[in-house]
Image (cartoon, helix red, strand yellow):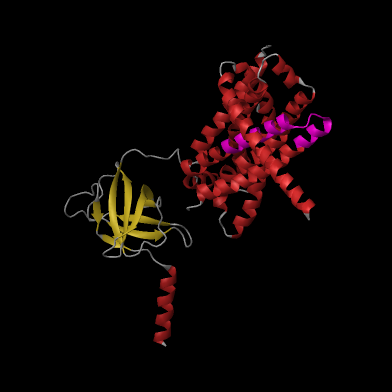
Amino acid sequence: MQHSKTQDTLVGLFVATGIAALFYMALQISNLGSYSSDDTYTVIANFQNSGGLKIKSPVSIAGVRIGRVSSITLDKETHESVVEMQIESKYNNLPDDSGASIYTAGLLGEQYISIDPGPGISGDFLKNKSKIDNVSSAIILEEMIGKFMLNKAEGK
Amino acid sequence: MFEFLENLGKATRSNFAKLGRSTLFLGHTLSGISDVIPRPNLLIKQIYSVGVLSFLIITISGLFVGMVLGLQGFYTLSDFGAEESLGVMVAASLVRELGPVVSALLFAGRAGSALTAEIGLMKATEQLSGMEMMAVDPVKRIISPRFLAGFISTPLLAALFSAVGVIGGHLVGVGMLGVDDGAFWAQMQANIDFQQDIINGVIKSIVFGFVVSWIALFEGYDAIPTAEGVSRATTRTVVNSAFSILGLDFILTALMFGDM
């Protein structure tokens, strides 16, 4: 069995480039670079209508992403949408009277939850399994257009 | 009428027989892999001929596919003022579909056909029976290292294809057409999920590598040992590989992204 050194080197180079390409994809192309799966805590909010919100939709304050939606279920008694979100532990100073609203990024963009920090009257912060009471639902474009049309028709 | 039924029956029987032979062959090949591990030289030689020699065609095709995606995507997206999404479009189509599929098709054409011709010719010149005469198992000595090499090389080639393609898309989108550099990468990173997109792409390419290597080696091993038989086997390798890759791609995509 003859043993060629250049061949070994080329094969090594090939495997190394292939693995480098995989790492490149993981870090440069995907969200792995900015991924922080470490410590999160869960916050719950009940919405009348969670619209087009999806699991993994972003949760943000002032445009900065602080977490993601982890589950959306229906409350069988109140028929409200129960949205659980994972918020990164380093943002543990959100006043417990903060509000949550569902907004749309751009006119046709995806929906996300925006948290509006409250005045913090009680001095307590949101903790694991806390519930946000001050919520405003998703704005459904069709519903708004429908209402607008109806108002116009009635006003005439 | 009876003749038709007879032919139909014959075709069914021979197809099932072939399926059975190929499954036995696969089992034999897989069991031979344990004998390859202590002799890495056999494997390195095959990775060289299967992987390293496909390197150039994969990178050049990847670059051009990425550049074309950048160009076409830009013209369509700019109608909606959404040029910033070019990065997502290029990366998602490459990582999810084009990377694994096109690199597997190229691999079948570049390396698969060569494998079939090589094995078929070995069979035609009775090298395989010669080995058996010397009590060397030809499947373990010849087939298994090639199979393992194909199996290892395809995911690497697909990853290269996608990575080079994204760079090609970046060259055209940002370099030529003036999409914002930051938006290109930021949108891409925000929308391409590691688990959902990249891992699934790699799984796809592993499946394709497995199937293409299997088809190529089996067709060679099962070829009629004449010049015409080998040429037919080579054609069948390319045709069957292409069908299997595209069909499996649909099934895998439906399984992976179906619930979205």
Residue furthest left in the image: A122
Residue furthest bottom in the image: A156
Q: Is residue B150 above or below residue B127?
A: below
Q: Residue at x 51, y 47 (%)?
A: B256
- Residue B111, quarter of the rendered image: top right
Picture coordinates of residue B98, whole percent (x, y) = 62, 44
Whether residue B129 appears in magenta in the rendering, the answer is: no
Picture coordinates of residue A75, whole percent (x, y) = 29, 61
Is B119 displayed left or right of A147 in the figure? right
Look at the image and tell me whether residue B160 can be seen.
Answer: no
Is A102 displayed left or right of A31 in the figure? left
Whether residue B219 appears in magenta in the rendering, the answer is: yes
Picture coordinates of residue A59, whole percent (x, y) = 36, 51
Span highlighted in magenta in the image: B206-234
Q: Is residue A78 above or below residue A124?
A: below
Q: Residue at x 73, y 49 (%)?
A: B8
Q: Residue at x 79, y 25 (%)?
A: B124
